[in-house]
Amino acid sequence: MSLWKFFLKIFAISMMTFGGGYTIVPLIREEFAHKEKLIRDDEMLELIALSQTAPGPIAVSTALLTGYKLKGRRGAIVGIVAAILPPLIIISILYYFYTWFAANFWVRAALRGMSGAISAIMVVAVYDLAKASLKEHKVFSAIILIAAFLTSTFTSINTGLIILALALVGIVAFRYVPKEKKP
């Protein structure tokens, strides 16, 4: 895949997706792991997990890491630009027409309608990512998933600290705990 084609794919995904990074990430995964088959699905899940730990928007981090995986440093830069440019263009346009958009009944109705669709997309994204990550270590992954959800829902602990703590648990569990040898 050429850098230009990569740029166009990330740009199109970023331009047509509303709701933030968690709605964009499954589309990037679908495009590059399933349709184009340029990255194995397990590698794509690792890129997504890594992009969640980086500061900043997850969509930009995922585009950066996908570009780096496919085309090195130039691909990373192209991924960043392609992911950032559409929201920048949209925000710039909205800046000039804000008062009209804010007062327009149809625009407000469309945005309210999109919020429901975005919620559904996020549920599907969480389901797909959970299903893929539960393939190999089902019980461990389910416990981590439930622990993260319960901790973030019922405590005021910073989500970043929860992710960091559970990442450390995963590192210890898979790097330092001896694995059982299969006969």
Image (tube, rainbow, N blue to C red):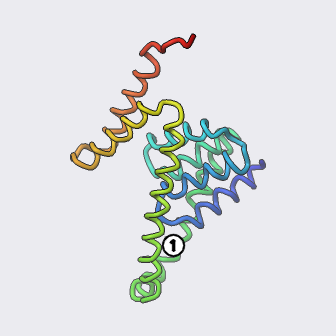
- Taking the spot 22% from the left edge, 48% from the top edge, the residue there is 154
Of the 4 image quadrants, the one containing the C terminus is: top right
- Taking the spot 52% from the left edge, 49% from the top edge, the residue there is 128
Q: How many marks?
A: 1
Nearer-the-camera pick, 70 or 126: 126
Nearer-the-camera pick, 181 or 59: 181
Q: Residues within 10 Å of mark 1 (few under 14, many from 20)?
A: few
Compared across the picture, whether 131 is left or right of 143 comes to right
The percent position of residue 152, horizontal first and vertical second, equals 29, 46
Question: Which residue in the rendered view is the most extreme toward the front?
Answer: 183
Nearer-the-camera pick, 71 or 110: 110
The percent position of residue 44, horizontal first and vertical second, equals 60, 41
Nearer-the-camera pick, 98 or 167: 167
Q: Is residue 104 above or below residue 58?
A: below
Question: Which residue in the rendered view is the most extreme toward the left?
Answer: 155
The percent position of residue 94, horizontal first and vertical second, equals 48, 77
Q: Which residue corresponds to mark 1?
A: 92
Question: Which residue in the rendered view is the most extreme toward the right?
Answer: 2
Question: In which quarter of the view is residue 82 placed?
Answer: bottom right
Q: Is residue 175 above or below residue 85?
A: above
The percent position of residue 55, horizontal first and vertical second, equals 43, 44
Compared across the picture, whether 100 is left or right of 128 comes to left
Compared across the picture, whether 112 is left or right of 18 comes to left
- Taking the spot 53% from the left edge, 71% from the top edge, the residue there is 90
Q: What type is the residue that disc 1 sits on?
A: Ser
Q: Secondary structure at mark 1?
A: helix
- Taking the spot 46% from the left edge, 87% from the top edge, the residue there is 106
